[in-house]
Image (cartoon, helix red, strand yellow):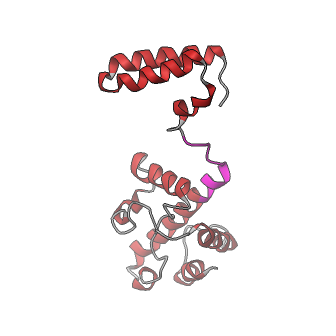
């Protein structure tokens, strides 16, 4: 990470304030202040290690698309009380692999838990380990989205369409 002197000054001041507000963490903030004050660039990663990399928009779009698709599926299940859809492996939103698809999983959690969007998915948070499928899912979801697009992203899906979407590979 590259920081200008101005960036460093702003961060130093922020860490001084935080050291006063959070006395239990003061020694950690003092260490960061020393790193920044002395320009120890080799340790700048200590300053931003807790900040994630930017999530590419296309990855965010996949999460939004799959949750939108599952909204349509949940709508069908609520109206029809059909159990055939529930019995399919992907008959409910299983989440994303926490080890290999962490950014997708984190974004889904943010949308469902923090923002309260896609609230119909909250009923599955225990079942899907808070959106952690424990198996790679993104490619399966991409296939499902592609199949859904062939139905013009219709939100009023038939049972046959849903089963085709869930069987997409």
Q: Residue at x 36, y 62 (%)?
A: 125
User: With 127 as the anchor, is 106 left or right in this view?
Assistant: right
In the rendered image of this protein, does residue 9 appear above or below residue 81? above
Along the line of sight, which residue is nearer the eye, 68 or 5?
A: 5
- Image coordinates for residue 26, horizontal then vertical, percent: 36, 22
- Image coordinates for residue 103, horizontal then vertical, percent: 55, 53
Q: Residue at x 33, y 19 (%)?
A: 21
Along the line of sight, which residue is nearer the eye, 97 or 123?
A: 97
Look at the image and say whether residue 66 sits in the magenta stretch.
no
Quadrant of the rendering where the N terminus is positioned: top right
User: With 76 as the anchor, is 155 left or right in this view?
Assistant: right
Quadrant of the rendering where the C terminus is positioned: bottom right
Look at the image and say whether residue 55 sits in the magenta stretch.
yes
Along the line of sight, which residue is nearer the eye, 127 or 19?
A: 19
- Image coordinates for residue 25, horizontal then vertical, percent: 35, 26
| Bounds of the magenta segment | 52-62
């Amino acid at each position: 990470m590259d920081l200008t002197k101005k960036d460093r000054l702003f961060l130093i001041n922020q860490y001084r304030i935080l050291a006063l507000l959070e006395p239990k963490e003061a020694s950690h903030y003092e260490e960061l202040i020393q790193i920044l004050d002395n320009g120890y660039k080799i340790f700048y990663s200590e300053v931003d290690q807790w900040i994630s990399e930017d999530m590419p928009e296309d990855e965010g779009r996949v999460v939004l698309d799959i949750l939108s698709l599952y909204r349509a599926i949940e709508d069908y299940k609520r109206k029809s009380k059909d159990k055939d859809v529930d019995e399919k492996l992907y008959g409910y939103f299983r989440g994303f692999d926490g080890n290999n698809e962490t950014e997708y999983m984190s974004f889904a959690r943010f949308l469902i838990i923090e923002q309260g969007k896609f609230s119909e998915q909250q009923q599955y948070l225990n079942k899907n380990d808070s959106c952690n499928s424990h198996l790679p899912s993104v490619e399966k979801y991409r296939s499902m989205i592609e199949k859904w697009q062939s139905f013009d992203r219709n939100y009023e899906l038939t049972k046959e369409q849903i089963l085709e979407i869930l069987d997409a590979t």
